[in-house]
Image: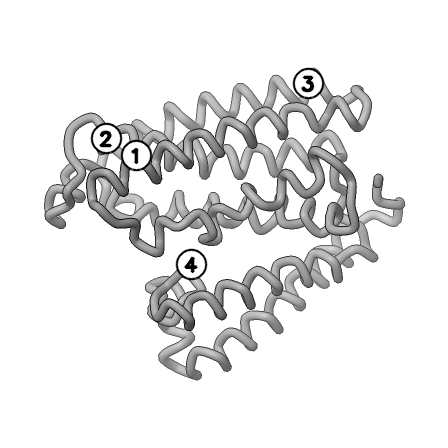
Amino acid sequence: MFFEAGAFYFVYLAVFGGIVGILVATLISKMKDKSYEEKLKPIRFFFVVLVILEITKIYALITINEALHPLRYPIVFCSIILYAWPLFSFKHNRFSEAAKSLAVLPSMAAGLVFLVMPGNIAPAQLYATGSNLSGFFVYALAAHSFFFHILMIGMGVYILAVRIYTIQKNNYYSAFLAMSSYLAIATVISLYIRNNISIFGPQSGQLGFLYNEVGYIPGQLLLIALLFAIYFAIHKLAGKNTETRA
């Protein structure tokens, strides 16, 4: 849990929460009355920034550890924005609305999950596990993680605030289908590599209680049913009746 990282966690949370908070508040203020195309420009910019940071991180991890753990693959749940953002921010296509939905509620949830359960992120925690990481890279990796996940939350707020995506009463199905598709893909990959590709893997620490109780595949089916109920409830209770902007 977050409190296990001690003061290190709160310092990083304050620094990167403040940076992202100011960025997002400024963007919302400046972009809320702009054209739809203009509103997409910050998302394109941050997509490029995150891709560069992700490539740098992966290269450094492989260089240091001579391997890349599956939970560091850029297709885990927290990397979902790297696939969702370009599907709607560069050119509209048949997947754009579903991609927007992934960039909002699931991405914000993923960011919050990290903030509650950041794992061994403080230097003292990493050294205690015998990690090969040391020195500057320990702090750089933590900075990357905090910036990445807090930005997921912030840009989800931005997308809703400037109405790039609107939660409507009738668009819950595409949102549910997009999230369920990711869960299915993560399940197949996890079973194929016999390791966890995300929190939805068979040895998941977060969802282990469910899989231990009902089994892995039945647990995934229950998650899909729960996803439908959550999306249906949110969209029906909080959704608007307006048409989604293409």
Mark 4 is surrounded, within 10 Å at the Cα level, by few (under 14), some (14 to 19) or many (20 or more) other residues, namely many
Q: Which mark is residue 29?
A: 3
Q: Which residue is mark 1?
A: 141
Q: CA distance from mark 3 to mark 2?
A: 35 Å
Mark 4 or mark 3: which is in front?
4
**The residue tagged with tag 4: helix, strand or loop?**
loop
**The residue tagged with tag 3: helix, strand or loop?**
helix
Q: Are marks 2 and 4 in contact (CB under 8 Å)?
A: no
Q: Which residue is mark 4?
A: 198
Looking at the picture, which amino acid does disc 1 mark?
A: Leu
Q: Which of these two is toward me, 34 or 241?
A: 34
Q: Are marks 1 and 2 in contact (CB under 8 Å)?
A: yes
Residue at the spot x=50%, y=33% of the render?
Answer: 151
Residue 239 x %, y %? 78, 50
Q: Which of these two is toward me, 179 or 154?
A: 179
The numbered mark, 2 or 4, whose residue comes first in the sequence reads 2
Q: Which mark is residue 137?
A: 2
Mark 3 or mark 1: which is in front?
1
- Residue 78 is left or right of residue 166, and the answer is left
**The residue tagged with tag 2: helix, strand or loop?**
helix
The numbered mark, 1 or 4, whose residue comes first in the sequence reads 1
Q: CA distance from mark 2 to mark 4?
A: 23 Å
Does residue 167 lie above or below 216 as drawn?
A: above
Residue 96 x %, y %? 74, 46
Residue at the spot x=70%, y=16% of the render?
Answer: 30
Q: CA distance from mark 1 to mark 2?
A: 6 Å
Residue at the spot x=74%, y=41% of the render?
Answer: 165
The numbered mark, 4 or 3, whose residue comes first in the sequence reads 3
Residue at the spot x=84%, y=40% of the render?
Answer: 246
Looking at the picture, which amino acid does disc 4 mark?
A: Ser
